């Protein structure tokens, strides 16, 4: 595809979400749950968060897509997360996986192993998380060990390129690696996108919010375009917000405001490169 | 009652809460729990949130009123919520019910059915939630099915009028339906109140925060006046906040600031109509 | 020690944390979990929050220090909290205890009793919490009953002085009592520190955030200096934030921004007195 074709598709989904207010349910961590919901509302979506298995199943069927973030696991999530992933998969509904904290604890590892067969439509993480997930699923580009702290430098994103491509080829969906230069791939094409702000690492939950917003966009387009749209929106809103920020907290306020104000026509300002693999 | 009589009672409770700093405990959802607490503090109250049954029972007895919001249920809430509701009811302490997400999941339905006999002093929700609760409790004006997404247009609020009146007559307390024109009733009188901001639907938890604030006011006046006071305060603070907001996040910051700055004498600016039924 | 010696050590740890980005894991309450994480990031640390026992154990070993706040207990915390406290203690890793809501519920009492032998490196609370904990642990200066509401006046802080000293002598660490004039002691020396803002009682979680930030600083210095550093940082950031605040919500935004901007050289502006006991 040409750059303009991507831009047109991205502009279209931004517009569609603003006019249809689609619902994307979430099972997500308690640290950033409020930010995820507010980011989903800011782009025009509707949010709903639950903890229990039957409620997650309900949302997976009622919503256009579902976001699963495996931070701050609760005991009940042993039942909830596989139920929601399986329901989404079997119903052909898109779902987004954020493998936060991969490598910490036995429940998380068991859950992430189960998710392999439910093929998340979008996987979003930083470089170390993506590499660790590919390793856990025994795909090319992965390693069996995880860097708990995560690294988000430019180099780190590129080191996850093979893992991202392997994961996308396995799921048939998209994989997004967040960092200074973001990488989004469907296993055939790789998008390298710039923008955002250094403040995004100084607030908790920018990545979670991005995953939640990708789920909102996934209600209205392909996983690949949804992942690109979320990435572009965050890069543009982050860049604009930084200009008026005095620190991380005012950055977050400006960021959500900018996300809300972002229009389809501004997407042409999001810098990116296309690479075929 | 005359308009001025309502205004006097509302002004009185705003002043009383600011000077006595009353505590209202909450069992509420994890998405908006921080906003609920901060809104309760902003109006002059004191906040305390718990998850466990004996802690909820303690708060119900120690506080002047309790707020129960049934979003993001946890397994332990099967024990906690009925304990708190029963404790409040049996002790003659006011408690506020926010039947968020009514219709989703079996536990929520079981809990909401149990609440019927514990007669919440205030029920606060949007039109579809109020109609669904009246239906669940087999009262006039209700339907057995719920619109999960909720609708908050002017019309929607009025479609919930019969349900709201039935619920208030059953509980002997007050029912508040949030929307473009809010409706608050004690089963005999209906207040129609205007104000607020379109941004209130663009942040998560405006309704939850209102429920929490009504609980704070319910420590210091009748359920009906508490529900009206919360509604007026949110309408005035929302209107003022919108004037300086660039988007939903800065709106939320201004909104809490305005809630904090709101004084008893400004209540005369809250537009409302009285209807006897 | 002389005032200048304290100031040098405080300046050093502020600088060290900014350059090494140390990780302090937390098990903390759901009301203020987001603020705790953002405050930890603002001072230059790295945050990670979990609920499950093996995840807490992992963080205790992987991080430089751990923060345990016993608000909003979940059933699983009966296993998680003692595991994390014991792991930290046995490994000689610093950990911070925030005995929020001491006196409410049986689980909290059982947990706080167990913590006595795991000797938290820093205990942070308001006067009534510190007195109640000393009472629970049968140390001098404590009482067996707790004032649930807490009091944060100047007098209240001084009434907790004996309890704070007893606790610090028992743990061999530091105890910080938050209030208008904060008190920090290692059982031998008492620091009385001024500053902050009246708005800190009008937002939920200023105390929790302080505990989390003390854990970040405890990764890089002694418990006593870590507790003093956190106290000075909050006093300076609070004072600066109040100057531009319109209310509690804008105060919180400015506060986190100021915490982020605070540099080692500004610590000289934090007013305090030293008392030897």
Image: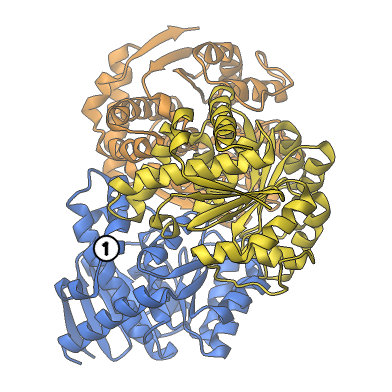
Chain colours: A orange, B blue, C yellow
- Dot 1 surroundings within 10 Å: few (below 14), some, or many (20 or more)? some
Asked whether B163 or A197 is in front, the reply is A197
Residue depicted at 45% across the width and 62% down the height: B37
Is B123 positioned to the left or the right of C118 in the image?
A: left
- Residue A242 is at least partly visible in this image: yes
Looking at the image, how many numbered discs can be counted on the residues?
A: 1
Instruction: Say which quadrant the N terminus of chain A sits in.
Output: top left
Q: Chain of mark 1?
A: B
Residue depicted at 38% across the width and 74% down the height: B214
Asked whether A39 or A17 is in front, the reply is A39
> Please, is residue B237 above or below residue B119 in the view?
above
In the rendering, at what x and y percent does residue B33 appear?
A: 48, 58
In the rendering, at what x and y percent does residue B72 appear?
A: 54, 58
Residue depicted at 33% across the width and 43% down the height: A42
Asked whether C200 or A24 is in front, the reply is C200
In the rendering, at what x and y percent does residue C251 appear?
A: 35, 49
> Please, is residue A47 above or below residue B266 in the view?
above
Q: Which of the 4 quarters of the picture holds residue C109?
A: bottom right
Q: Which residue is mark 1?
A: B261
- Residue A219 is at least partly visible in this image: no
Task: Say which element carries label 1.
Answer: helix
> Please, is residue B136 above or below residue B49 in the view?
below
> Please, is residue A50 above or below residue C24 in the view?
below
Asked whether A177 or B243 is in front, the reply is B243
In the rendering, at what x and y percent does residue B68 appear?
A: 50, 71
Q: Which of the 4 quarters of the picture holds residue A195?
A: top left
Is C264 positioned to the left or the right of A146 in the image?
A: left
């Amino acid at each position: 595809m040409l750059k303009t074709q991507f831009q047109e598709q991205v502009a279209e989904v931004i517009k569609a979400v603003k006019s249809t207010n689609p619902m994307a349910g979430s099972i997500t961590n308690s640290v950033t749950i409020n930010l995820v919901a507010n980011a989903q509302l800011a782009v025009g979506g509707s949010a709903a968060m639950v903890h229990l298995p039957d409620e997650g199943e309900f949302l997976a069927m009622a919503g256009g897509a579902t976001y699963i973030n495996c931070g701050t696991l609760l005991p009940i999530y042993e039942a909830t997360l596989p139920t929601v992933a399986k329901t989404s998969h079997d119903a052909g509904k898109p779902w987004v996986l954020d493998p936060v904290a991969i490598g910490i604890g036995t429940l998380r590892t068991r859950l992430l192993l189960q998710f392999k067969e439910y093929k998340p439509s979008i996987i979003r993480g930083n470089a170390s998380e993506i590499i660790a997930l590919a390793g856990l699923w025994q795909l090319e580009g992965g390693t069996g060990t995880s860097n708990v702290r995560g690294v988000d430098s430019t180099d780190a994103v590129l080191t996850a390129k093979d893992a991202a491509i392997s994961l996308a080829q396995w799921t048939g969906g998209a994989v997004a690696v967040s960092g200074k230069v973001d990488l989004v791939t469907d296993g055939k094409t790789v998008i390298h996108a710039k923008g955002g702000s250094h403040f995004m690492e100084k607030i908790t939950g920018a990545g979670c919010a991005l995953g939640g917003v990708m789920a909102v966009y996934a209600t209205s387009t392909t996983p690949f375009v949804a992942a690109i749209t979320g990435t572009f929106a965050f890069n543009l809103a982050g860049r604009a917000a930084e200009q008026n920020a005095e620190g991380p907290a005012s950055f977050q306020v400006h960021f959500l405001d900018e996300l809300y104000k972002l229009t389809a026509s501004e997407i042409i300002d999001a810098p990116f490169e296309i690479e075929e693999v």
